[in-house]
Amino acid sequence: MNLKELSSYLGLSQTTVSRALNGFPEVSEKTRQRVIEAAKAHGYMPSQSARGLATGRVGAIGHIIPLGKHQMINPHFSDFMAGVGIAYADFGVDIVMKICAQDQELATYRKMVKSNRVDGFVLQGPLVDDPRMDLLQTMGVPFVVHGRSAGATQPYNFLDVDNEGAFERATQFLIDFGHRDIALLNGLETMDFAHKRRKGFLTVLQGAGIPVRPELMFSQDMSEVYGYEVATNILALPNPPSAMLCASKLVALGVMRAIADAGLVAGKHVSVVTFDDDFGFLGTHAAVPQITCLRSSLYRAGTRVAHMMMAAVDDPLGISTEIWEPELVVGKSTGMKL
Amino acid sequence: MNLKELSSYLGLSQTTVSRALNGFPEVSEKTRQRVIEAAKAHGYMPSQSARGLATGRVGAIGHIIPLGKHQMINPHFSDFMAGVGIAYADFGVDIVMKICAQDQELATYRKMVKSNRVDGFVLQGPLVDDPRMDLLQTMGVPFVVHGRSAGATQPYNFLDVDNEGAFERATQFLIDFGHRDIALLNGLETMDFAHKRRKGFLTVLQGAGIPVRPELMFSQDMSEVYGYEVATNILALPNPPSAMLCASKLVALGVMRAIADAGLVAGKHVSVVTFDDDFGFLGTHAAVPQITCLRSSLYRAGTRVAHMMMAAVDDPLGISTEIWEPELVVGKSTGMKL
DNA sequence: GAAAATATCCAAAGCGCTTTGGATACTTCA
DNA sequence: TGAAGTATCCAAAGCGCTTTGGATATTTTC
């Protein structure tokens, strides 16, 4: 059933039916109801291709996910995507997800814009200097960044958590417990968030007059094994850290495993604080969390970003930015230095 | 730059340019080259909406992900999606991902079909009786199932692993080590894969004349915490199991944590075997795996399903099915019963 | 060398929608 | 009561592509 058939069935013009369904005022309420009912009864839905061609808006947002050598999708995406997706549904918009090799990323953006696949993009995992933003800005395509990019020259839409402030607080929290030898298991510091976390960490250390120990600072892709291996190694040092600050729950889980393997107890022999994106899939969101963490919901971030995206499509000139403060949740993994 | 502009720039008709770019033979090789170069130079890409409208093929495959009360995307999806996405790229096709509330699932399929958003669907996580398959079959939309559905009445495209056989082997493997009290930490048994795994488990137990202990059989959403809690409980039983069979690496990780917490050693006091979808994100793919597992790559399954999907779109009548045998990888988590 | 076949190109229709620019009937107001 | 406004609807153009059904030039065949 298409518009033509529906309108001839109703004895109306296509114009009127289209307007009735799209809520234009030039249609009497009586006909509108008649049209809506007939549409529902016959299961009529406008062809998105046709509508896209006519309006220039295709009702889809692009999410491009580059795959590195590990060929995997970062699990931090999952919960975020869930939030985004649910929010899009309210707007009748859907996600066009494109997975590509890392070196094809910019080309993929270009292609999707040129072929008119999407009305805008959501950028995830921004780097300190991120070429995607320049590209999209020169192409004049609306986008919203989840995160921030320190190197950006022009204003742009973003939603970020206060990574720097969060790690300042976490570091201070550990110092207040008497810790001075604190390890940092950071994410890749080409990523803006990791860059900012390191900055926050160092600021507080220096403010407290604590010498920085570079051999306790790590920067890698965040995984459980990364946490396990690093923690195992540094616990075996002659002068091991008494506290560890992790960039992700995944890393922290590895750290906890290493601590247990070493016959130690977290919160007693070693304190652990982590940034927790609060993803659901580990099922770790307990009432009293095991691990002391800075917590911010990726799901909620997703829904918010989706709304910002819709606004950006409607008004490509308006810029909106938001910074969320993560919550510090004290768990059982932190305690006074022995 | 659109077709009209490009062709008038070249002094050719739209017909010729379109044919040149789409590889039709009615164009001289000389003009074809000229056209291709000009297209590249001007960054011309055909509008997908227009092409979709003209051809009826929109170059997109739908992946609908229902969100349960936990509001999360199953992490088992991630690696599979990565494989699918990379394979689609070769066909110039992309994923339209729709996230919806669980009770909206069928309606979402219907809408996407009616509005002509996609050329087909990939179904994940099929149930024993899955209404999606009936729906799509009556609507005449091509689809490929990752997994199988025991209750299906008509033939359909699928790629599955041999869940029943795999759990038969795993169970036998444990029995050969002298274990008789084996716990099953299964996934939700409304899911076809879990149903089949339970079946395999029971077949071998009964074949070996080992009485089934229902208090050692569990069926839940697979998460780390599920594994931890169940293992903690059953290890405290007066007559605890000497072996555990898990449906997912996530569950197994929880089990391992519980074993460690109980002061026991996996592979010595308790044996653990798990189904391992070999997802990259945990970084657990070590040369010598910690945990004995039945392994099958979700990523490779994804690429294969993508190819089957493309074939299904090209030939909606041809049916293809594939069943993969997972590999049994012996790790350090299994040993003779003490 | 004329007829038939082939190679190469083009004009125009059509995909299903939105939207512009009226047309028609019905009210309202002085 | 006639003019002006308002409510309601419609015909047709246009979005950018593919594809049908020729047209024209170039070879091939007899």
Image (cartoon, coloured by chain):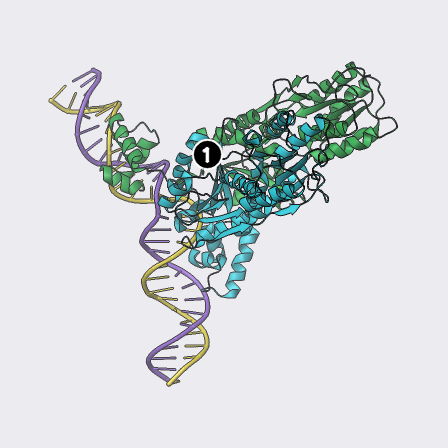
Chain colours: A green, B cyan, C purple, D yellow
Would you say B335 lies left or right of A138 here?
A: right
Say which of B203 and B186 sits in front: B203
- Can you say which quadrant of the picture contains the C terminus of chain A? top right
Say which of A168 and B161 sits in front: B161
Point out residue B170 in the picture as x, y percentages from the top left corner.
61, 43
In the rendered image, the vertical position of residue B280 relative to residue C10, given as above or below: above
Report the amino acid beneath label 1. Answer: Val
Would you say D23 lies left or right of A277 here?
A: left
Residue highlighted by disc 1: A93
In the current view of this chain or complex, which residue is farthest to the front?
B209
Asked whether residue A77 appears in the rendered view, the answer is: yes
The picture quadrant where one finds residue A250 is: top right
Tally of numbered tags: 1
* Element type where label 1 sits in the image: loop
Point out residue B115 in the picture as x, y percentages from the top left corner.
39, 40
Point out residue A140 in the picture as x, y percentages from the top left corner.
55, 37
The picture quadrant where one finds residue A15 is: top left
Residue in view at x 59 percent, y 28 percent: B226
Say which of A256 and B80 sits in front: A256
Would you say A260 lies left or right of A156 here?
A: right
- Can you say which quadrant of the picture contains the N terminus of chain A? top left
Point out residue B64 in the picture as x, y percentages from the top left corner.
47, 38
Give the crowd class for mark 1: few <14, some 14-19, many >=20 residues within 10 Å. many
Q: Chain of mark 1?
A: A
Asked whether residue A189 appears in the rendered view, the answer is: no
In the rendered image, the vertical position of residue B132 relative to residue A275, given as above or below: below
